[in-house]
Amino acid sequence: MNARMEQATRGRPPRAALCTGATLEADLRPENMKRRIAIIDDSRAKRAALAYVLRDSFDISAYGSGREALPDLLRCPPDLILLDIEMPDEDGFCVIRNIKAQPTLRDIPVIFITSVDDRHVEAEGLRLGAVDFISRNFVPETILARVNVHLELQAYRRSLEDAVREKTRMVEKLQDSIVITLSDLVECRDVATSGHARRTISYVEILCRELAARGMYADLLTPETIEVFMRAAPLHDIGKVGIDDAILNKPGRLNDLEFDAMRHHTLLGARAIQRAIDQMGAPTFLDVVKEMTLYHHERWDGMGYPFGLQGEEIPLCARIMAVADVYDALISERPYKPPLSQEQVVAIMAGERGRQFDPAIMDVFLSIHEKFAAVAAETER
Ligand SMILES: [Fe+2]
């Protein structure tokens, strides 16, 4: 028997062959699949005894220590691990810690095999993540039954997780389609900004990913947060549904009164989102939508609206949105102005560094503004 790894599988190829693909296709057929169990025990006789009991029902890999097992476990994670507690060098507690520290292994059920009948040992093993204890003096039928129970529980847990993931995906898709529908409705009324809401998704993504790549706002800009910012972006002007058509689509510049009315779109939008938050219990997504809606016209220097917030008082999502929003407004045609060239837009926005815009975000924009231009060129404006 191989000193490093014993194959107790009867009539089947070695695990290494399974994993390297020599007989992979045949072995992956559902009718040929056997669940895999790793046995880690320093006693060769005890490994053999366990393997003997289990070999008809499972593929078995057996190891004399955790150190010996770990590389194989990582390469080919088993479905369940039987782990001896009393071993020289690394005991079972040490081995289970190493196993649970590996993301690909941490969900695999571990059953301790022990000759120690001690409540404290059992409590410690369970605390470290073991799912069960089996006495070294096991009865074959008992160990088979308990292994099967834990494999079934594991399969059930995985199917539940898959179902939750699928439901979450469906809810996110539904949320995205509602967001796009709502932003399209806003744009139906605001004839000058066709495609603006959708383009802001791309601009926000470009800025967020570049900021994250440079380690800026690292505590805030996680991959999950960036997704939320992107999904919230198209709703930033949702409050425009409450603005009079004559103002919204006025050809030419707004007078002071009209501009005051227009400013209200931030408050109207935030109020509508707040109602949804009150009903939904404030999930992260709606909080971000509200912040973007309410604060995207605030300025870094405190001269914006509706509250005149300053610097980092303005939520990061709104500071990012401000750059996306203004870029698209400048590069696009509006009733009161023709489209500006990329050079003109960049020059104007650079002049607002530290005034209208967060200087750190503006520096990033200035270094990657061609990516904004590519988005603007791709879409009809
Ligand atoms: Fe706006």
Image (spheres, grey):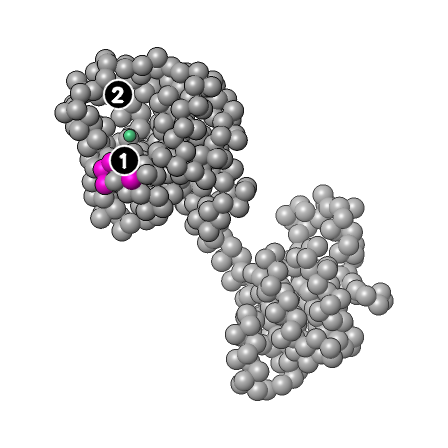
List x then y, in percent, for residue 234.
Answer: 35, 31
**Numbered circles on residues, count:** 2
Residue labelled with disc 1: 304
> Residue 259, located in which quarter of the rendered image?
top left
- Judge from the rendering whether residue 310 lies leftward or rightward of residue 172; answer left or right: left
Amino acid type, callout 2: Asp
Residue 55 highlighted magenta (yes or no): no
List x then y, in percent, for residue 7.
Answer: 78, 63
Q: Residue at x 39, y 37 (%)?
A: 354
List x then y, in percent, for residue 174.
Answer: 36, 37
Closer to us: 359 or 149:
359
Q: Residue at x 31, y 14 (%)?
A: 337
Single out the mark in the foreground, 2 or 1: 1
Residue labelled with disc 2: 190
Work out which quarter of the rendered image holds the C terminus and state it.
top left
| Whether residue 191 can be seen here | yes
Q: Is residue 20 above or below residue 137?
A: above
Q: If the picture is divided into quarters, which one holds ligand 1? A: top left
- Judge from the rendering whether residue 331 lies leftward or rightward of residue 18; answer left or right: left
Task: Point out the stretch of residues depicted in magenta.
Answer: 302-307
